[in-house]
Structure formats: structure tokens, C-alpha cells
Image (spheres, helix red, strand yellow):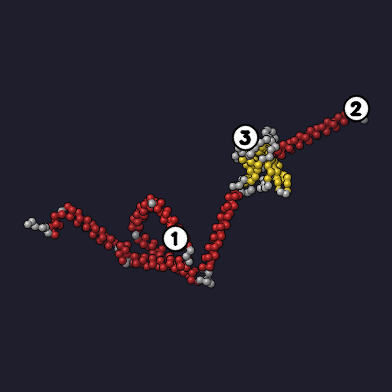
Amino acid sequence: MSNKDKKQQYANNTARNIKVAIFAIIALAILYLGIKFLKGIKIFGHKQYYYGVFEDIGSLHESTNILLNGYPVGKVTGISLISSNPVRICAEFLVTEKFDLPSDSKFLVAQTDVLGGVAVNIHLGTSSKMAHNGDTLACGLQGGGLTDGLDDLKGQLQSVLASVDTIGISLRETFRPSDDQNGALMLKSTLVNLEASTQHLNRLLANNEAKVSNAVAKLNELATTLSDASPKINTIINNLDNISDSVAKSHVNTLINDAQQTITHLNDITDKIEKGDGTVGQLMNNDSLYHNINNTVEQLNTLLKDFQAHPSRYISIFGRKKDK
């Protein structure tokens, strides 16, 4: 091979190597830019780096959004442990939007959802001195997030469940067959009596639909009156709350006995009314009494009108004092 051929081959190899190197550099540049793009970091434009030292970073991780009043202005670009005793963790904040950042501003890590999502909120300070690239600013965890609300709700639910469990234990002790078999029997008897009373009332309502409609109209007027007197009713309700606390402490069997006696008495009353016993029964079941009362009232009204129109007729009946 001549010297000319060797030089030509060397030149070709050199050109090939240069092309490979150029393609490798371009590929690395594209890879770098692609990684930055996927992380949401602007390649060109404004860049300011700030740092914060935490004792506890919560769920903070790289690529976490940095927000200013909800608007994304940057990313967390690095987290590193700088001390283990005491624990100190350094976070690097990249701000890609241009704005004035007072030196007493804070980077606060906050929960954004119940699944553990986080963001870094910038709490702007009031200092006239502005922070510069590379400064270390105050930071911490922001309270009052969603998880704090869930923790409060969890505590309230636990308290409610404990109360329900206590009530359940009390009811089991009250109606346990080995201790008090009468409790369950009394409750069953009460329910049977209540069903019978309901049937009686349904029959009475069906037979007196017109009168019930009139009563409903009166109740509507009463509801309007009660609405106007709502402040006084609120006071009464507060007093009833105190009474209900005392009633709630009463023994269950005593309440059942009282309820059973009341329902039995109500059954007797409804039976008598349905049979037509007494004035109320006659009024509800016998229209003749109702018509007689109406006729009597009408006759009395006629008599009063005639008395007002012709009083001399009735004065002469009782006698007139003679002139001396």
C-alpha cells in the first residue's frame, strides 16, 4: 500500500470517528434535555436556586412542584442528608419564574390530597431585602392540610364508635335472657299493642275524613302561629334538652312499662269512641247529635235576632211597671 493510500485511509477513519463523536454528543445532549423536560425543568430562561434545611421533610421528593399562590414556579431538584445526629436534610429548590422573593420568605411542604401528594408552597415574607441565587431560606412542614382534617375526623369517629359500643353493651345487659327475660317479652307486647292502636286510628280516620281535613287546616294556622313564636320555642327546646338528659338516664324496663300502660289506655279510649260511648263517641259516630246541636244553635241565633228587632214583645212577657 502506497503512502498516498495510507493517508487516504487515515483521513477516512478520522472523519468516521469525528462523525461518531458528534452523534454521541448530540445523543447525550438530547438525553439530558429529555430528562430535564420530563422532570418539568425549563432548559432555558430564568433560573434561581435556593436551599432549605429540614428536620423532617414529610413526603417531599425530587420533582415536587413549587407553588406561589397555587401557580407552579419551579421544582425540587435535589434532596440530600447532610447530618444524621441531629438529622438535617437539605433540599434544593429551583425557581424558574422571575419574581421578587423577600429574604424572610419560607418554603413550606404541604399535603395536596389524601393519597400522599405534596407540594412546596412559597410563603412570601415582608422584608425589604431580597433573596439571591444560592441563599438558604426558612422551610418546614405546613399544617392544616387534608390529613390533619382526616386525623380530626378519625378522632371524632373513634369517640362515636366508643359511645355506640357502650350503648350496645348496656342494651345486651338489659335484655339478656339469663338476667331479665321479661324485658324482651314486654317489648314484644308493646309492639303488638302499638300495631293494634294504629289499626284503630286508621279506621277512625277513614270514617271521619272531612273532620280530619278541617283539623289539618286548623293545624296549618297553628303552624303559622308557632313560626312567629319561634324564639320562645327555642327556649322551650333548650329546657327539653335538659329534661331529655334526665329521661335518657332512666331504666329501659321502666320506660317500657310506662309506654305499655299508655298504649293500653289509648286502646280503651279508641274502643269506646269507635263504639259510640260518651259524648265524643256520639259526635264521631252519630250525625244526629251533631245536627241537633246545629239546629239548637240556629234556633238560639234566630231568637236573639228577633229579640233585638222586637224587644217589646219580650218585655211585656215579664211585666211592665205601672205608672202611679
Pointer 1 local density, CA inside 10 Å: few below 14, some 14–19, many at least 20: few
Residue type at mark 3 is Ser
Rounded to the nearest angstrom, the CA distance separating label 1 from label 3 is 62 Å
Residue shown at the point (60%, 37%) measured from the top left: 126
Using the image, tell me which numbered label, if any, was put on residue 4. Answer: 2
Q: Quadrant of residue 4?
A: top right
Observer able to see residue 18: yes
Q: Position of residue 155 (x, y in %)?
A: 58, 55
Is 251 above or below relative to 30?
Answer: below
First along the sequence among labels 2 and 3 = 2
Tell me, for residue 243, which label it has, or none.
1
Q: Residue furthest left?
A: 324
From the viewer's perspective, is 159 left or right of 297?
right
The disc labelled 1 sits on which kind of residue?
Ile
**Disc number lying in front (1 or 3):** 3
Query: Which amino acid, mark 2?
Result: Lys
**From what the image shows, is residue 231 above or below residue 253?**
above
